[in-house]
Image (tube, rainbow, N blue to C red):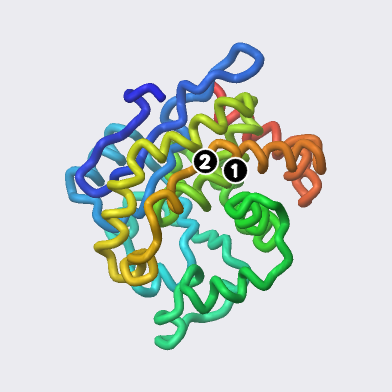
Amino acid sequence: MSTSRWIDLDGVVNMRDVGGLPTTDGGTVATGRLLRSDNLQDLSEADVDHLVQVVGVSDIVDLRSNVEVHIEGPAPLQVRGLATHHRHSLFRDDEREITAEDALVLPWSKKNQQAADARPRLDDDYWASHYLGYLADRPDSVLGALEVIARAPGATIVHCAAGKDRTGTVVGLALSVAGVSDEDVVADYVATGERIEQIVGRLMARPAYGEVMKDQPMEHHRPKPETMSRILTVLTERHGGAGGWLQDQGWSSDQVDELRGHLRA
């Protein structure tokens, strides 16, 4: 992946602009419309100023769970009120209020993982099954996130914790709707692997993630091309593509066109 797409700041390690990716009809994705990132909690004042004044960020889509937000607190962009913050958790049990007891049990903790493993698998690929679960469990949040992207007056940052799984699912859908080839959507997804050690190291130092991640091997976190490829294949086989999935969830063709048009140069 071109190094020019990475946005190197003090407080993140996995931020990049998806602009510049080619579309199958000879066009390109517009720069300064959609950024993907890991957690924004550690942004410095200089980082915030750069994102707002240089990149033109106007909106933040936060895909983290209520538990994560409860533990981590608001990020600098939200505290300073310099961008509109939109919460769209992809966890299905995340509509209830969080108590102190809840904050001790993260959605990916061993207790919750055992419950998740007991659910019917949606796909043979472990991570693909999780990503398909996001679409099945919280289509409202996925649609909400994509609507923010489509209507933002400036650049939108989509982020979760690592900027890989939840972010990868939403951004993959957006890029597919924009007309990016499956091959290039997959390449964008796996680019996170270039910095997976830094991403994991950063999360390990944070209270919300360190304890539950300490015994997981690095390869468990590294994105694999077959995972995103499988998601795109399922969307095509079942819905005729990402745009078809959106329409099957209630979007009109005009809404799909609005997202596509906003993302294209």
Residue 217 or residue 57, whichever sits in front: 217
Which residue is drawn at the image coordinates 28% and 32% (left, top)? 54
Residue 19 placed where, x, y %? 46, 26
Query: In whole angstroms, how far apart are the C-alphas of marks 1 and 2?
Result: 6 Å
Instruction: Give the answer, above or below, for where 106 lies relative to 176.
Output: below
Label 1: few (<14), some (14–19) or many (≥20) C-alpha neighbours in 10 Å: many
How many marks on residues? 2
Please give the name of the residue rendered at 48% of the width and 67% of the height, measured from the top-left corner: 65
User: In the picture, residue 79 is in which quadrant?
Assistant: bottom left
Q: What element carries label 2?
A: loop
Identify the residue under disc 2: 224
Q: Specify the quadrant of the image occupied by residue 180.
A: top right
Q: Residue 86, relative to residue 28: is it above or below?
A: below
Residue denoted by label 1: 227
The answer, for residue 218, to whether it is visible in the render is yes
Judge whether 38 appears above or below 189 on screen: below
Asked if the residue at tag 2 contacts the one at tag 1, i.e. Cβ–Cβ closer than 8 Å, the answer is yes
Amino acid type of the residue tagged 1 in the rendering: Thr
Pinpoint residue 181: horizontal percent, then vertical percent.
Answer: 62, 24
Q: SS of the residue at dot 1?
A: helix
Left/right of residue 60 with respect to residue 41 in the rendered view: right
Can residue 143 be seen here? no
Identity, as a three-letter code, of the amino acid under mark 2: Lys
- Where the N terminus falls, by quadrant? top left
Measuring 43% from the left and 34% from the top, which residue is drawn there?
Answer: 191
Q: In the displayed structure, does residue 123 sit left or right of residue 69?
A: right
Up/down of 197 relative to 208, above or below: above
In the image, residue 255 lies at what x, y percent?
70, 39
Question: Left or right: where does residue 114 sit relative to residue 240?
Answer: left
Residue at 68% from the left image edge and 63% from the top image edge? 137
**Residue sitting nearer the eye, 216 or 250:** 216
Q: How crowded is mark 2: few (under 14 residues within 10 Å), some or many (20 or more)?
A: some
